[in-house]
Image: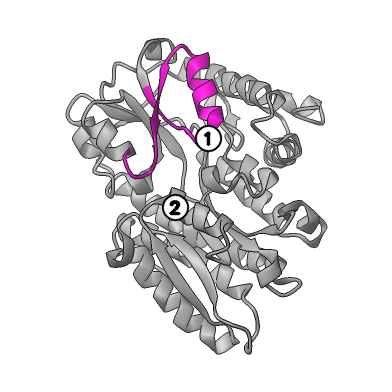
Amino acid sequence: MAQAKKSPMKGAAQLIAAVVTAGALAAPSLGHAKSVMCVWDVVGKTGDVYAAATDYALAMQKHGIDFDIKTYVDERVAVEDFRAGQCDGVVATAFRTRQFNAIAGSIDSIGSTTIVKNGKIDIDASYDVMRKVIQVFATPQAAKLMVEGNYEVGGIFPLGAAYPIVRDRKINSVEALSGKKVAAFDYDKAQGVMIQRIGAQPVSVDVTNIGPKFNNGFVDMVTLPAVAYKPFELHKGIGTTGGIGRFPIMIPTVQVILNRSKFPEGAGEKSRNYWLSQFDRAMHVIKLAEKGIPASAWTELPPENIPKYVLMLREARTDIAKQGLYNKVGLNIIKKARCNINPGDAECATKNEVE
């Protein structure tokens, strides 16, 4: 585990690389051919993710688990190779892995884990919602929900709250976004729907170009967690006029997806429980990354807007679910977690978020 002296970027790399262990835990016993884990790393084999993944592979050998790591700088190709059977597991963002399990992928839906208390964002409580959902998904009772066809979720961990990052801090309200260009992952259709809903213009991006498009002015706003600040060099796009709004749009995750036919019975559940045990490690990395951002880069939204925006995200989320872009079962599980953490919220008067 990264110690406090390490940089947020190093910590983020180790956090993402740690997910490889979950895939390793679910690997076949000795006597089988080596498994292959597709691992996405922004900078490939020279990156911290690949190096840490190699360390994890060596550590897992004492458990009789042996696998090779196939690394990618293009997340899209990693997922496509997994679908084509060139890998037995894949490590990628939930935006990409949602196609393999829509229930687990719902954890990355807009505003689904955000908690407001006394008119203010309670970020610690929001992370408690995330922890609670991961706990539920790791239980034996939820095992069937973690399987879709031949695919099984082998682990979930948070990358940290994703904040609105703008080139001009005058964009500090939904109204100010009207007509502005906002980055949207085209493989997550819900993002484009939400952006159009507020009158802004979605601009297609992926993890390989979202930083340059923001830094070079092709988009006015991106939504990213703090762990992306240094590797994507977002300070260039923020400059002296931009800022990071302290309002979590969502808490994105990285997820492990396993090909069930390549792993023994029960491996997925063991793997999910392993990743549940790594939640505090993830939080340590997230907090380091946020502390590594200059205080001057952060901006506060007008407090009167916060409850309004949370409600707006909730309404948009349910509408998007009705369009089939979010999984209703997943959203209802997350609502139960929110109400477990914050039972006094008015939304808890009803059982389900989406019928």
Looking at the picture, tell me which residue is in the foreground, 175 or 131: 175
**x then y, percent, for residue 225:** 41, 42
Q: Which mark is residue 188?
A: 1
Q: Is there any visible trace of residue 97 in the rendered image?
A: yes
- The N terminus lies in quadrant: bottom left
Q: What residue type is disc 1 on? A: Asp
Q: Which residue is mark 2?
A: 77
Element under label 2? Answer: helix
Whether residue 250 sits left or right of residue 243 in the image: it is right
**x then y, percent, for residue 320:** 64, 24
Q: Is there any visible trace of residue 290 in the rendered image?
A: no
Q: What residue type is disc 2 on? A: Val
Of the two numbered discs 1 and 2 on the same chain, state the one appearing first in sequence: 2
In the depicted structure, whether residue 64 falls above or below residue 276 = below
Residue 168 magenta: no
**x then y, percent, for residue 194:** 53, 22
Q: CA distance from mark 1 to mark 2?
A: 16 Å
Applied colour scheme: one colour
Q: Nearer the viewer, mark 1 or mark 2?
A: 2
In the depicted structure, whether residue 108 falls above or below residue 222 = below
Looking at the picture, tell me which residue is in the foreground, 124 or 272: 272
Q: Residue at x 51, y 53 (%)?
A: 79
Task: Write down the region rendered in magenta.
Answer: 182-209
Whether residue 140 sits left or right of residue 226 in the image: it is right
Number of other residues with Cα within 10 Å of mark 1, as a class: few under 14, some 14 to 19, many 20 or more = some
- The C terminus lies in quadrant: top right
